[in-house]
Image (spheres, rainbow, N blue to C red):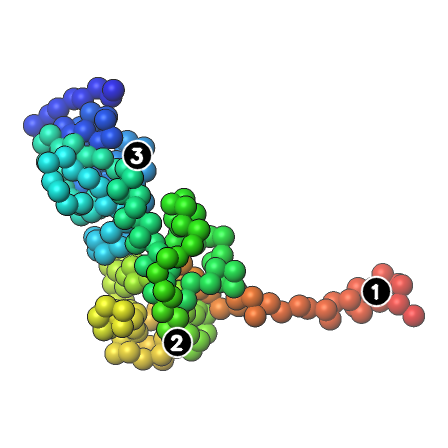
Amino acid sequence: MKAVSTTAASLTLNIDGQDLSCRAGETILEVARENGIAIPTLCWLEGLSLWGGCRLCLVEIAGSPKLHAACATVCTEGLHVTTNSPRLTHYRRMIVEMLLSERNHVCSVCVSNGHCELQSLAQKLGVDHVALPYRFPKLAVDNSHDLFRMDHNRCILCTRCVRVCAEVEGAHTKDVKGRGILAAIIQDLDQPWGESKTCTNCGKCVNICPTGALTHRGTAVGEMVKKQEFLPYLTLMRGCGK
Ligand code: FES
């Protein structure tokens, strides 16, 4: 058990059997991470404002029948929190299955295959099949930007891109239109990305996207270009050409 030291502005709580202390105002997720306790997340990212949309960080709090989002729940004195249980794993798996079935997440042909947060969460949670019917929506790929690409088929609407664009870059080029399964990330007044007057081409949105929705151009499998022109030059310079 960790030593618990309390000051005027500190609280004590118990997470997964460990007695811990934290500062007033900290969330369960922050305290868990500070103490090496892993809670899965998708929409939360350190440095961005809270969204609380993905619900993967759900935890159990003793005395409360409902589940609570760890990223959005501020600690109070004496909380007893469970971050890992068969019930939580059941709901986390269900959320990942819903995300996988809602759009077109075909990992084998995705540019983010092998470095996708959704894919690795599915692997960690043991999601080896999806019990829900796939929707297979026909969604657009915005190829209009010189540097980047938006594939709406891979988007999980975590809004990290919207928040980093507004809160860190200060451009607020991106936003969300529509509701529910019809929601989509847009640029400015729903223009093609390449026509945006406010995008600064900083690439922050691409770098913090958890899936293959936002990518650099030229990284897709179909864009692989072989440069074989070097060979005649090489053989000439090595003196083996005739
Ligand atoms: Fe908490 Fe998404 S990480 S709701």
Amino acid type of the residue tagged 2 in the rendering: Lys
Element under disc 2? loop
Image label count: 3
Left of 18 or right of it: where is 98? right
Q: Are marks 3 and 1 in contact (CB under 8 Å)?
A: no
Asked whether 190 or 94 is in front, the reply is 94
Front one among 142 and 148: 142
Residue at image point 35% right, 60% down: 132
Q: Which residue is mark 3?
A: 37
Q: Residue 36 falls in which quadrant of the image?
A: top left
* Residue position for label 2: 138
Query: Which disc, if any, is residue 46?
Result: none
Q: In the figure, residue 185 lies in which quadrant?
A: bottom left
Mark 2, ligand 1, within 8 Å: the answer is: no
Image check: 193 left or right of 235? left
The answer, for residue 1, to whether it is visible in the render is yes
- Mark earlier in primary sequence (2, 3): 3
How far from the left and from the top, in percent, is residue 210? 38, 56
Q: Quarter of the image holding residue 237? A: bottom right
Q: Which three-letter amino acid code belongs to the residue tagged 3?
A: Ile
Residue 189 at what x, y percent from top left?
Answer: 25, 78
Query: Which circle, 3 or 1, is nearer the viewer?
Result: 3
Which type of secondary structure does the marked residue at label 1 adopt?
Answer: helix
Question: Could you tell me the amino acid type at mark 1?
Answer: Thr
Residue pointed to by mark 1: 235
Which is more foreground, mark 2 or mark 1?
2
Q: CA distance from mark 3 to mark 1?
A: 58 Å
Disc 2 to disc 1, how far (Cα)?
48 Å
Tell me what residue is drawn at x 42 percent, y 78 percent: 144
Q: Residue at x 14, y 35 (%)?
A: 62
